[in-house]
């Protein structure tokens, strides 16, 4: 059998979708192939290294293997070294760990690699950690929003006044505030006074916590939210809806948010910082505030309402939370109210909200170019940017560190996406924006499409093609000692030098801080005549290296199910290859 590999190019979406016919029996067989006992590959799967076309790449040239080439490829040897990144990208694959083998077709796998997530799935490491209070609340709110639909009459109420009328400070208003994490929602009445009235954001404070923040502190908060954070979100993702025609997003500070978790629970479950809930936009029930509202906790240094929260803690935590939730608000309005569709899928919705957090960092990075605004003049980011960018850097590092455990395009069933999955989604979207332009974020939000269909329509290519080249880019970008123009733009980040950033992250946090090495990806070696087995999630990748000896003319490569037979077409099996030496 003669097979060849070709550079992956974007295909028409119609052609891709025409081939997405799931075969239940085949998928069941694929899912069952999670064992690691080697079986002699079927004799009909010929891979003799002679019948196949040899793939010869220049240094830093990349190739994506698809089709027959996945089952049998021959790489030029003579000292060449390659990074090899297998993937499963099929949209019909259920979430879970799938067994595979990669390497020489005739080798008995000598080393078994099983990712930690699969061990958890199989019960070997116990149940996953329970979500904290914020994650649990967000999971339930986003799940409820996915089932919300708005009638044409309600959607027709959307309107934005040309010049909203100014409000009178200290005006008293009654709100209905979600007051529980329970599956069954419950609300509490809250009386709050208007303490800041901007052009985009109005801040109300619960009368029960009237002295939690001073007028000066509220003015500073309002100036940041109204003058920087909200404009950044609206410029990037589009304007928020405005169903009550007040021209503003309401920011309500209330101890009812603190009290969603008791003081006793706080030590084990964490606490809720803030949230947006589409119920306020989609429902005409008495519990709906019929407007765009973001709810947040208040400083409580004595622990009157729940566990104690200092003023400095609250003021540091709320801006990234606000900008994160504001993206959810804009997205819900755009998808559900304005277009009558479903709210965005969790993985993409969360990835975009982490992009929103980065907008806060970019604001401070622009305001304080190096070395200003830094306690240590040599640090990469100003102090004020750290709460927005540092979590994303840590999450994305951990995603790359254990990439086979996390999917870029799905969350575990019933989950809200782990922080590491969100970090991967943020990194993936950052690379896509670097390739396609920053307006991709607005186009991803201002649509009725969701999930992969949304991503593919905006990018104009298949998600499989993007996943393949993203896997290359995270290793090919900013290689030390190599001029950037040696690597094609498709395999680079334009906005960030993540190799340098991760090195500095390692220097700052080290092993004790969960950053185990200067660069998160450490390829597993596949030697001459060797194969490895393992498991991986659909929608992600693992990274291996193949180093050929000077006297080895070629190296054979097969990516298959553990017994050596081919993956079914519905698996979306593919292999990204980058020559590095």
Image: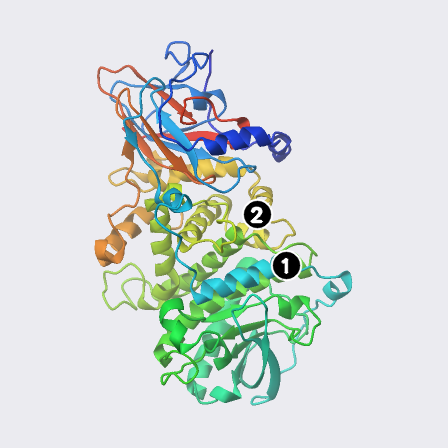
Residue 47 appears left or right of 521:
right
Q: Residue furthest right?
A: 153
Q: Which picture quadrant has residue 303?
A: bottom left
Residue depicted at x 35% and y 24%? 38
Q: Decide: is 421 above or below 96.
A: below
Q: What is the secondary structure assignment of the residue under circle 2?
A: helix
Q: Which picture quadrant has residue 395?
A: bottom left
On residue 467, the disc is none
Do the CB atoms of the residues marked 1 and 2 lie less than 8 Å apart? no
Residue 161 appears left or right of 516:
right
Residue 359 percent location from the top left of the image: 45, 61
Residue 254 appears left or right of 79:
right
**What is the CA distance from the residue labelled 1 to the residue labelled 2?**
15 Å
On residue 334, the disc is 1
Q: Nearer the viewer, residue 278 or 392?
A: 278
Task: Give the mark, 1 or 2, whose residue is nearer the N terminus.
Answer: 1
> Which residue is label 2 attached to?
451
Between disc 1 and disc 2, the foreground one is: 2
Q: Decide: is 139 above or below 72.
A: below
Residue 274 percent location from the top left of the image: 48, 71
Residue 191 percent location from the top left of the image: 58, 86
- Judging from the image, the colouring scheme is rainbow
Residue depicted at x 47% and y 87%? 209
Q: Is residue 489 visible?
A: no
Quarter of the picture containing the C terminus is top left
Q: Which picture quadrant has residue 510?
A: bottom left
Q: Residues within 10 Å of mark 2 (few under 14, many from 20)?
A: some
Q: Is residue 417 visible?
A: yes
Q: Decide: is 6 above or below 383.
A: above
Q: What is the secondary structure assignment of the residue under circle 1?
A: helix
Q: Decide: is 224 above or below 378.
A: below
Residue depicted at x 24% and y 39%? 481
């Amino acid at each position: 059998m003669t097979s060849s590999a070709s550079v992956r190019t974007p295909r028409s979406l119609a052609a891709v979708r025409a081939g997405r016919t799931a075969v239940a029996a085949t998928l069941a067989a694929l899912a069952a192939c999670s064992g690691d006992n080697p079986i002699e590959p079927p004799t009909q799967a010929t891979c003799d290294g002679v019948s196949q076309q040899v793939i010869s790449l220049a240094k830093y040239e990349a190739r994506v293997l698809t089709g027959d080439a996945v089952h049998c490829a021959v790489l030029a040897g003579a000292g060449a070294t390659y990074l090899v990144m297998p993937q499963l990208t099929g949209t019909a694959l259920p979430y879970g760990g799938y067994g595979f083998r990669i390497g020489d077709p005739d080798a008995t796998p000598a080393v078994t690699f099983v990712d930690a997530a699969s061990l958890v799935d199989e019960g070997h490491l116990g149940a996953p950690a329970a979500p904290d209070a914020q994650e649990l609340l967000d999971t339930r709110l986003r799940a409820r929003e996915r089932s919300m639909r708005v009638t044409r009459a309600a959607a027709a109420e959307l309107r934005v006044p040309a010049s909203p009328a100014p409000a009178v400070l200290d005006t008293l208003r009654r709100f209905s505030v979600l007051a529980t994490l329970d599956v069954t929602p419950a609300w509490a009445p809250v009386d709050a006074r208007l303490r800041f009235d901007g052009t985009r954001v109005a801040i109300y404070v619960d009368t029960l916590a009237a002295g939690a923040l001073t007028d000066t502190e509220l003015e500073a908060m309002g100036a940041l939210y109204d003058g920087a954070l909200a404009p950044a979100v609206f410029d990037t993702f589009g304007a928020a809806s405005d169903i009550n025609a007040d021209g503003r997003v309401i920011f309500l500070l209330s101890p009812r948010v603190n009290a969603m978790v008791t003081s006793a629970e706080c030590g084990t479950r964490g606490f809720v910082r803030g949230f947006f809930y589409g119920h306020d936009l989609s429902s005409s029930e008495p519990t709906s505030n019929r407007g765009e509202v973001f709810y947040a906790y208040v400083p409580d240094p004595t622990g009157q309402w729940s566990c104690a929260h200092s003023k400095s803690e609250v003021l540091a935590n709320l801006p990234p939370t606000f900008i994160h939730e504001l993206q959810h608000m804009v997205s819900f309005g755009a998808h559900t109210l304005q277009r009558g569709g479903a709210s965005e899928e969790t993985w993409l919705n969360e990835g975009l909200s982490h992009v929103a957090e980065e907008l806060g960092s970019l604001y401070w990075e622009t305001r304080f170019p190096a070395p200003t605004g830094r306690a240590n003049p040599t640090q990469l980011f100003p102090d004020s940017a750290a709460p927005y960018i540092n979590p994303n850097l840590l999450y994305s590092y951990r995603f790359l560190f254990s990439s086979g455990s996390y999917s870029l395009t799905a969350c575990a069933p019933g989950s809200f996406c782990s922080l590491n999955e969100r970090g991967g989604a943020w990194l993936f979207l950052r690379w896509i924006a670097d390739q396609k332009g920053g307006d991709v974020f607005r186009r991803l939000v201002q649509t009725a499409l969701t999930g992969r269909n949304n991503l593919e329509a905006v990018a104009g290519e298949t998600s499989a093609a993007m996943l393949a080249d993203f896997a290359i880019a995270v290793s090919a970008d900013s290689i030390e000692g190599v001029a950037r123009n040696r690597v094609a733009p498709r395999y680079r980040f334009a906005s960030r030098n993540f190799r340098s950033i991760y090195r500095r992250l390692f220097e700052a946090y080290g092993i004790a801080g969960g950053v185990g090495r200067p660069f998160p990806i450490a390829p597993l070696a596949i030697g001459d005549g060797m194969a490895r087995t393992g498991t991986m999630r659909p929608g992600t990748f693992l990274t291996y290296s193949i180093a050929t000896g000077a006297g080895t003319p070629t190296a054979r490569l097969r990516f298959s199910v553990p017994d050596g037979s081919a993956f079914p077409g519905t698996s979306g099996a593919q292999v990204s290859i980058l020559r590095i030496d």
